[in-house]
Image (cartoon, rainbow, N blue to C red):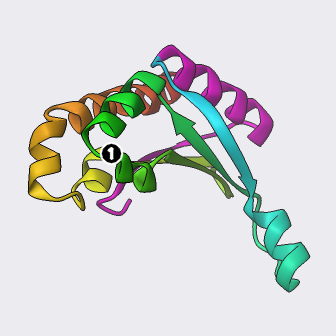
Amino acid sequence: MASYGMSTTVNRPREAVRERVVAALKDEGFGVLTTIDVQGTLREKIGVEIEPYEILGACNPSLAHRALEVDRSIGLLLPCNVVLREVPEGVEVSIQDPEAMFSVADAEARQRLGDLASDARQRLARVIAALQRG
């Protein structure tokens, strides 16, 4: 996995994995604000076929509010993307690393954010761990 995310593969049908991901996110205070069917969009818009690939836009309202209070333009970095992609072994679930995401903020904003990115990362790492436990 690239340095800007964390991932695991779950050997279950995609819809079952999606339900588990949404439930694990909810347990950590995140909701799903957006869903993008990348496979369907690419098929419709440019006639390209790829594996089932979905992006969920996950948001923890309390963390988002704290970040927006520091700098309203931080909204450009929200929500946190969660990718579900079918692979031969099952469904790969990848989650954007908030620490990597917020590293693009200027030094003053990062200082004012304090441990927010670390807190978000720990919560999302627990989502990955919950998926690995089954």
Task: Provide the secondary structure element on which disc 1 rests.
Answer: helix
Q: In the rendered view of the protein, which quadrant contains the N terminus?
A: bottom left
Residue 36 percent coordinates (x, y): 72, 54
Q: Give the class, few, some or many, for how many residues have Cα within 10 Å of label 1's Cα (few <14, many ≥20).
A: many
Q: What residue is pinned by disc 1?
A: 98
The answer, for residue 134, to whether it is visible in the render is no
The quarter of the picture where the C terminus appears is top right
Name the residue: 21% across, 56% down.
103
Q: Is residue 106 above or below residue 123?
A: below
Q: Amino acid at mark 1?
A: Pro
Residue 24 among magenta residues: yes
Q: Residue at x 46, y 47 (%)?
A: 78
Please state which of residues 111 and 115 is positioned toward the viewer in this rendering: 111
Total marks drawn?
1
Q: On the picture, is 100 further left or further right than 8? A: left
Q: Which residues are magenta?
A: 1-27
- Looking at the picture, how far across and down is residue 31, in whole percent? 59, 27
Query: From where the camera sits, is residue 97 visible?
Result: yes
Name the residue at the top extreme.
27
Name the foreground residue: 82 vs 61: 61
Q: Is residue 120 above or below residue 6?
A: above
Which of the 4 image quadrants contains residue 129? top left
Horizontal and vertical percent position of residue 38: 74, 63
Residue at 46% of width from left, 28% of height from top?
A: 127
Going by the image, does 53 lie left or right of 60? right
Q: Is residue 134 left or right of residue 61?
A: right
Does the magenta segment cover residue 39? no
- Measured as percent of width and height from the top left, residue 28 is found at 45, 19
Q: Residue at x 77, y 59 (%)?
A: 52
